[in-house]
Amino acid sequence: MSATPEESFQSKGVARPMQVVDVWLEAGREGRTFTYADHRQLGVSLGDLVVVRLRGRRLQGLVTASRPLRDDEQARSPHLQPVEALLQRAAVDSDWQAWLDAMAASCHTSSFRMLKAALPPGWLGQRAKPPASGRKLWWVALLPAGGAPPPKSARQQALLESLKAAGGGAWQRDLLTQGFHAGMVQSLQTNGYLLREQRLAPASGPSLELHGDHCDEGGLEPPRDLTGEQQAALERFQELPEGGGLLLWGITGSGKTEVYLQLAAAEIARGRHCLLLTPEIGLIPQLTDRCRNRFGRRVLEYHSGCSDGERVRCWRRCLEAEEPLVVVGTRSAIFLPLRPLGLVVLDEEHDSSYKQESPMPCYHARNLALDRIRRQGGRLLLGSATPSLESWSRLKPKGPLELARLSSRISRQPLPPVRVIDMRHELAEGHKQLISRALMDRLAALPAKGEQAVVLVPRRGYSTFLSCRSCGEVVMCPHCDVAMTVHGSRSQQQWLRCHWCDHRAAVTDHCTACGSSAFKPFGAGTQRVMERLSEELDGLRLLRFDRDTTGGRDGHRRLLARFADGEADVLVGTQMLAKGMDLPQVTLAAVLAADGLLHRPDLRAGEHSLQLMLQLAGRAGRGEKPGEVLVQTYSPDHPVIQHLIDGRYERFLEEEATLRQQAGLVPYARACLLRLAGRSAAATATAGTLLAEQLRPLCLAAGWQLLGPAPAPVARVAGRSRWQLLLHGPPESPIPLPEGSDLWDGLPKDVTLSVDPDPLQL
């Protein structure tokens, strides 16, 4: 299809044939191809990203074909719009595009949607806004010595010398690239050696290269000595064939990261790139620092915490790399164009954050990684202290994965013992407080011992909901079918917030249903726990670690650096606490309100709860001092709590596998969730019914079951009604859905549909 020109093109008598290109643009749900002419002789070719206009809009698209203008098309050329600019040459190669097309088919989405999800934000479609002129970043400058002695640490002295060589100041980002830790910078600032201030950086951002023309390899950290188990795991991985995978099952503190680094070093020596994935941004700083200490300027970051410009620069460096790179990122980094790719690591592979649920395409980074190495080469390493049942069920001989174990901690400290606090006894003995007496006593003793603790609270905010004691009315979000969460503190202003749509409202003193003043917050969030601890334990220093306190590019790194530097005795946080943090002074890990984790209406509630609590337990006792775990619960006899006490996670997996096999549930069956959403509840339900009628014959023919349509567990979000259909069938069988856009063609305009193959939440 040809685009209508805004101005007729006047031929300039170009000697060589005019090039005509087909450009894939964001038009309609699937994207459409339009024909343009390279009037400006930009040399556009297949796989380039270009800027064109469509109906007056400036769009960025992918060139899918390029050819000379034939003689019989000369009359048509003045009516073709020009390619306005070449955005990125050779952005997409044929092998990578073929892999994306296959993944699009497996996710039941269009190739255009998959391509747009894979490329950096803004590279396809219409850029929402022009790039900013710059943003504020940390600038680090030397302060006059004033006769002060140099710091005792050799690395701190090296940091000061690096700043001197750079003229007395540098972006903190560049210092981290050189392998210096953020905590080191803050320690020097506290002791009066440095000044840190935020300055406006140029739009291109701070340099990702080291100061100077080349990396000083002599300043990098050498590999550490491996234990016998680590060496055996490394050798087991190196024996894998191309396209093979290994599950590294290592208890917390057993040195999995060192295995990752030494395997990456081996791939770099072979001239191949490495990709290290973590489930959440909060884990990026620690892994990035470890990698930069070892590999220097080879290390890049790619995740949603980076600006659009930073992600584009990372992508371009991957395309144009002249040396092997190590990229640390979250699930979206699996799409980076690294060729040849030698190693893909999924750290904390069990974590549900590797699954993209919304918007489409709905994919799991683990599945994409397995398919990518099978098609393009390289090997996959899945690391976890608590592997997912899905990965455990894929071990040989039933599946493609090999197994290596790390059963001892590097520190030689045993795993901390678990002590369960039965809150029923606390209540019977007249103690009605949120925090048990045993935990309160243990926390009170921390400062005198020079120790630290982490306290897990299932929810952020002050209280989980606000309820009337007279009539039972709960304050709900006006746009969603969920209770509003109380934020703020009892002594200061409080407000209500919906964690689904971010609607906010004031806290009222009277029930709107019955007029009673017996309105009370129920449950406890991180803010309320902080308030209670500060009231009960005077002098105990506290820090809060949740989404509300870790905003910004380096929010996680800054807060953890403060805690590691000893600014607080207790770190109170949500599930972020349990994931991958190495804090040697932490000797106590505590779980409040474990019942909120155990009794969720979720097929995987038991598995996820045990994983979370075992991971949290692993934060304690990683240094020289032994650790301890305290768990508060009203269900001490729950199977998950019993497995937490005995630490026999494999026994839990065996029991869980037996239950799911007998019931025909995932991963011993397949599932697919179709989610519909619309302003009208009636129209959305009707669309679900019609969709079910369309799919039922296909499901019957394939031996699949179709359940629904039914309201979603949260039936309304942001004012939109939500319904769903669940397809359930034999393992390894294709999902019986029609190809292309057939599912969407009959939907009302206001009803949206997303397809989630192999969902984690039903």
Image: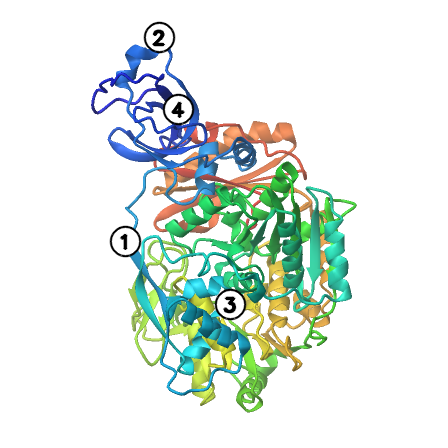
Mark-to-mark CA distance, 2 and 3 = 69 Å
Secondary structure beneath label 3: loop
How crowded pointer 1 is (Cα within 10 Å; few <14, some 14-19, many 20+) is rated as few
Q: Position of residue 446 (x, y in %)?
A: 55, 87
Mark 3 or mark 2, which is nearer the start of the sequence?
Answer: 2
Residue, disc 4: 22
Left or right of residue 554: residue 268: right
**Residue 430 can be seen in this image:** no
Residue ranking furthest to the top: 72
Amino acid, disc 4: Asp
Task: Give the total of numbered labels.
Answer: 4
Quadrant in which residue 471 is drawn:
bottom left
Q: Is residue 686 above or below residue 604?
A: above
Query: Residue at 25% of width from left, 17% of height from top?
Result: 11
Residue, disc 3: 458
Mark 1 or mark 4, which is nearer the start of the sequence?
Answer: 4
Q: Position of residue 277 (x, y in %)?
A: 56, 54
Mark-to-mark CA distance, 1 and 2 = 47 Å
How crowded pointer 3 is (Cα within 10 Å; few <14, some 14-19, many 20+) is rated as some
Mark 2 or mark 1, which is nearer the start of the sequence?
Answer: 2
Secondary structure beneath label 4: strand
| Residue depth check, mark 3 versus mark 4: number of the one nearer the observer | 4
